[in-house]
Amino acid sequence: MNITNRRWLIVLGIMLVAANQRAPITSVGPLISDIRASTGISNTVAGMLTTVPLLAFALLSPFAARLARRFSTERVIFTALIVLLLGTCCRSLNGAGQLFAGTILIGLAISVCNVLIPSLVKRDFAKQVGLMTGVYSVSMNLCGALASGISIPLARGTGLGWQGALACWSLLTVLAIIFWSPRLRGTGLEAATTSSAAARKKPNLWRSGLAWQVTAFMGLQSLIFYMLAAWLPEILVSRGMSQGAGGWMLSLLQLSMLPFTLIVPILAGRMRNQKPLVLLTVILYIIGIGGLFINSNALVPLWAVIIGIAGAFSFTLAMIFFSLRTRTAHEAAELSGMAQTVGYIMAAIGPMLFGWLHDMTHGWDLPLMLLIVASVFIFIFGVGAARDRFVDSV
């Protein structure tokens, strides 16, 4: 196989792995009511269906870079895909226990891919980091959006129920496994990268102010996304929108991200610093989330699109910061692991807290205010993360 074809297969493999990083989670939100009715769980416990994967992200993320150094990035990602397949199948069995056990496996598997894909891009596409960050972000968000939109039609239109609708996403994982398998033969790039990284003095990211700013930015944008992924359909249903339409609004939010998840990282990679993009991100978040306080379903598509664009900015900025603020693929993996460990601990409390605040107040205004506060902090930490510096700089 010539080099051009080989690189296209690498790109396709990365896209398929990315496609599996959101769909298994975003497919749950529109089905929350069905799952709650079937299992008898409360709103707070239902919120944990989104929280549990985030806690799993935080648990395994610190070890992903170490596993990659020992067994190779390709093999670790392949193993994660197998675990993801097992988790998806387990989650679709009857019973709350199996539901949460499968969800844990899904979270552990996705956490590995979340950490290693940015470092893989830096390693294999060092001169096209912005473009490749956009490519895998588009793949991730496209499948996440489709999962939100078709969950209700799959569950009710085909008679599969919520278990069958969630199980369908195992087919996407099988496809990723098939196309990733050839990479197990190795590329020869891992050893070279590891050797290069070893020759450099390893920075202590936990003492780096810049690394902590990237981490906070990552966590806050994840906090907003996963709270909305879990509860936006429920908010809209409580205001008179049908459950199917509520799912499609979440889908619209994610579909609106697609062009910007490709454009933003390319722009960010060409800028000396990314502060203007951070400012625009926060303005869009405040406008879109603020619009949800208006009890008008006719305007919901507008707010969904604006929030989606803001989400595209914040997510792709977080991803490209892992590459732009580090010098090597090894450092990128370490920063990605740190940011996703601490960041997802922050994000994990979001859906459960959102549901708890609703249970306590019997309304959505206070939970939505939490999103506004998170947007303000995104600006504070994002301005620092956007500086033209490296994490090992003094």
Image (cartoon, rainbow, N blue to C red):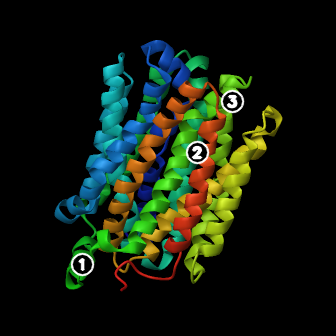
**Which residue is farthest front?**
361
Q: Residue at x 63, y 44 (%)?
A: 369
Mark earlier in primary sequence (3, 1): 1
Q: Is 370 on the left or on the right of 346, as rendered?
A: right
- The image shows residue 244, relative to residue 260, as above or below, that is above
The one nearer the camera, 113 or 278, is: 278
Q: Earlier in the sequence, mark 2 or mark 3?
A: 3
Q: Amino acid at mark 2?
A: Leu
Q: Which percent across, then down, holds residue 238?
A: 68, 24
Is the residue 343 above or below the residue 150 in the image? below
The local crowd at label 2, few if under 14, some if 14 to 19, many if 20 or more residues have their Cα within 10 Å, is: some
Residue at which label 2 appears: 370
For image coordinates 36% across by 86% down, the residue present is: 394
Dot 3: what SS?
Answer: helix
**SS for callout 1:** loop
Residue 87: image location, x then y, percent: 33, 34
Name the residue tied to disc 1: 202
